[in-house]
Image (tube, rainbow, N blue to C red):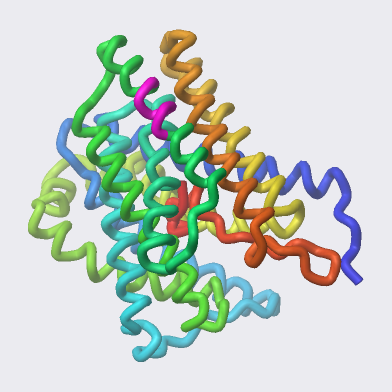
Amino acid sequence: METKRSSQQIACVISLYWIVSISMVFINKHILSGSYGINDLSIFVAWYQSLSAVFLIKLVTWWSGHLRLGLALPTLDLHQLLNSDMLKLSFSFVIGLTFNNLMLKHIGVAFYQVARSFTLIFTIILSFCILKKSVPILGIASCALVIMGFVIGTDQEDNAGTLSIWGMIYGIFASLANAVCGIYFKRVEVVLDGDSLKQAYYNNINSVWIFLPLVISSGQAQQVLSSDLVTNASFWMFLTFSGFLSLSIGWVSALQVKYTSPVTHHISINAKSVIQTMLAIMFYHEYKTLMWWCGNVLVILGIFLYAYTKINEGPPGSVVNGSRKPLPVYTDVSIQKANAN
């Protein structure tokens, strides 16, 4: 029989999720915003994050083996590693992570939630086109709220002179790639028998090799190796830590669902987005108008409304044996959940 979670446990898990998720955005922004030179390192950073994730999985499983914690490194099965759905997941992950980094390079952290808001809309469209799922009225209403929030937020950024057209374009492409990633994330779960550690391990191995020609052809690897960044301890520390956070976000998301509920998880995502936006405004000493805040609120309400419809529409999210089945989380990831949002 499942033990009742204490309020302290729930508070710790939610706090852990917030810390990991918010830290990942701020650290990536620090790396990509010119702190280490004006050269574009978005692809190199994404490649190194996948590479460090592979080594971190190896390190954690090695450490677990020595302490007899029962966590073993997944064996490499080429048929599963090169499965078509696994490769599609990895390619969409690579595209999403690259565009996400490019977007973060051109926009402020405060605008991050709005810039990535189209993930929800693309998720609904792809679910209808690929998975043949019907779209409920409330799902359409949630899209309308997100679009209204996006338009208002973009208009206010433009009025403030902080709007980046390229940042918006990268955000839309990142949203599309992350929505595709969410679709294949569920398909790969079946291929790998629901083994989340193997899924993360295989996805990052594939991503390292997919990223490699991009890193070389873009010249970003050469830029790093021929510059002072090679001996910059701060750069490598932040870069490695960002890889750790990108790997951890999927785990802490699952942990939050386990210790709370799908409803609480989605409330936490939206509350975290508000806190993240407020922290960014205070940290970067920005001023935002009332209409700008209205745009953000509409986006958050749209995402929450969609989460509410998924929880109440039936499997997944239906009540089975007195408990509600968890629903897939498409809004936070980076994916990585796949990333996730």
Residue 126 in the image, given as x and y percentages of width and height:
38, 59
Between 202 and 143, the one nearer to me in the picture = 143
- What type of secondary structure mainly makes up the magenta span? helix
- Residue 256 can be seen, yes or no: no
Q: Residue at x 29, y 60 (%)?
A: 94
| Residue 282 sits above or below residue 303 on the image | above
For this view, does 287 lie left or right of residue 142? left
- Residue 145 can be seen, yes or no: yes
Q: Residue furthest front?
A: 137
Q: Is residue 148 magenta?
A: yes
Q: Write down the region rendered in magenta.
A: 147-152
Q: Residue at x 42, y 65 (%)?
A: 183
| Residue 56 sits above or below residue 135 on the image | below
Residue 54 in the image, given as x and y percentages of width and height:
41, 68
Q: Residue at x 90, y 63 (%)?
A: 3
Q: Is residue 218 magenta?
A: no
**Looking at the figure, which quarter contains the N terminus?**
bottom right
